[in-house]
Amino acid sequence: MAAVDGTSEVLIIEDDALLARLYVEQLRMAGIAATAVGTAAAAFERMTHTAPALVLLDLTLPDANGLDILADLRHRGRGCDVVVVTAHGSVNVAVEAMRAGAHDFLVKPFAPERLVVTVRNALALGTLARLVDRIGERASYCGMIGRSLVMQGVYRIIEGASQSRASVFITGESGTGKELAAEALHTRSPRAAGPFVALNCAAIPRDLMESEIFGHVRGAFTGAHADREGAAMRAHGGTLFLDEVCEMDLALQGKLLRFLQTGSVQKVGSGTTERVDIRVVSATNRDPLTEVDAGRFREDLYYRLHVVPIHLPPLRERGDDVLLIARHLLGELTTLEGKRFKGIVPAAEAALTAYRWPGNIRQLYNVLHGAIVLNDGEMLTLEMLPAVVREAESQAVAPAAASRPIGPAAPAAIEPPPLLDFEPVDDDDDEADELLAGSGTRIIPLWQVERAAIERAIRICDGNVPRAAALLGISASTIYRKRQSWAVADVDGTTVEM
Ligand SMILES: Nc1ncnc2c1ncn2[C@@H]1O[C@H](COP(=O)(O)OP(=O)(O)OP(=O)(O)O)[C@@H](O)[C@H]1O
């Protein structure tokens, strides 16, 4: 047999010539290459030369039964996905086709948008599945735990991008592992022996930022007692990771852009430039294009940094990865704390799976850390988890009972102090407590409640912002950023953007 070339084409097998033409047109208008044949024989003939990326298969053809063709496609292992098309009223056949390996089905008549969305989804999933096939399924990669399909895609992109010098832009909610991904890009790259320098653009005061990145010469500003190298210089031969890059001051964004264009660093207060060889990886937990649209992030810089995009999905979209990560962290934290935990009981696993983890893996780490510190035993039980996580389990298992008090079955004696709830520690807390509890019918703006919660956590942690952030399940940089906007609001009396 002649070699079969793979294409990105959709092959439509439809005996109604008018419909076939219509599908081809609708897909082409959406930018998807498609071609149509009217019989199974013609389809197989075509497939001896070219393997389509996807087959759109009408289940009622003149020369063969659609289900037989499906079996034949799978039997011959042509590696393409199949979306079946059935007549109205024969959904059971579609279900049978899905069982036989079809990827999806469409019931006639369907709107053009439905056709395009179904085909696009099937193509995207097929691409991911092929990537997974190529790299083999991994349960972890460079310290990132996760076996889900979405994470296999992330590993694949990191693996590919690590070999190049192209700028990588990582997006994802706080705590999804953006820094870990940046480190993976570095350790898998030919620059691995060089330095990895991380700079959190939100955690450094704006007026010090330029010197942090580019360095300064002695006397450049008050307090500049000696020459100092900036992060760009320290990352020479390695990788510079700019975390929370969207927080960077607009004026400094211009300087960063010039640096990226020229590869030359100019220290604050210096008249000379020095060349450096670095690879830049940036990250943000904001939507960068919204920041561009709002005029807070330079479009030219965005395109300069956004050569290879990587999106880290939130933990709640990674399926069973939450348990893989939880079991891994349980082992790590058990050793760290000198405890005896060996596993997690099914009810606790159900809660960990059902909870939405707004603070993602960082929050999961903190929840488990708290549970391990505060409890003893060999198994982590539901009662050891904070109320907010237990509640998710009860809602998932028995939605009708969701409003009943949480955890009544847990004997009071073994109820641990919930990790996320603290007792007030001093009188300064009165105001915060009142705000957090609400008083009477007064409705308190959400930002004030949030501010009270954050300030209270910082007080309880004796001013230790990173610790307060960890316990709140957010990043320290988020706290610094919010504090900055409160300070502005305090001065000019405005309200705060959430
Ligand atoms: N897939 C993973 N497996 C195991 N641990 C992970 C994974 N992803 C992240 N972590 C851990 O979760 C914590 C948060 O990760 P990281 O700091 O990389 O997140 P981030 O997205 O950069 O957060 P932020 O936006 O707040 O800066 C770290 O302790 C990291 O080691």
Image (tube, rainbow, N blue to C red):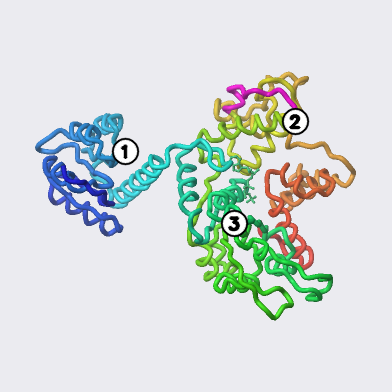
| Residue under label 3 | 284
- Decide if ligand 1 comes within 8 Å of the CB at mark 3: yes
| Residue under label 1 | 103
Give the secondary structure at mark 3.
strand
The residue drawn where x is 56% and y is 48% is 184
Residue 333 is covered by the magenta coloring: no
The amino acid beneath tag 1 is His
The residue drawn where x is 58% and y is 35% is 325
Mark 2 touches mark 1? (CB < 8 Å)? no
Total marks shown come to 3
The amino acid beneath tag 2 is Glu
Q: Nearer the viewer, mark 2 or mark 3?
A: 2
Report crowding for label 2: few under 14, some 14 to 19, many 20 or more residues within 10 A (C-alpha): few
Magenta stretch bounds: 337-350
Q: Earlier in the sequence, mark 3 or mark 1?
A: 1
The amino acid beneath tag 3 is Thr
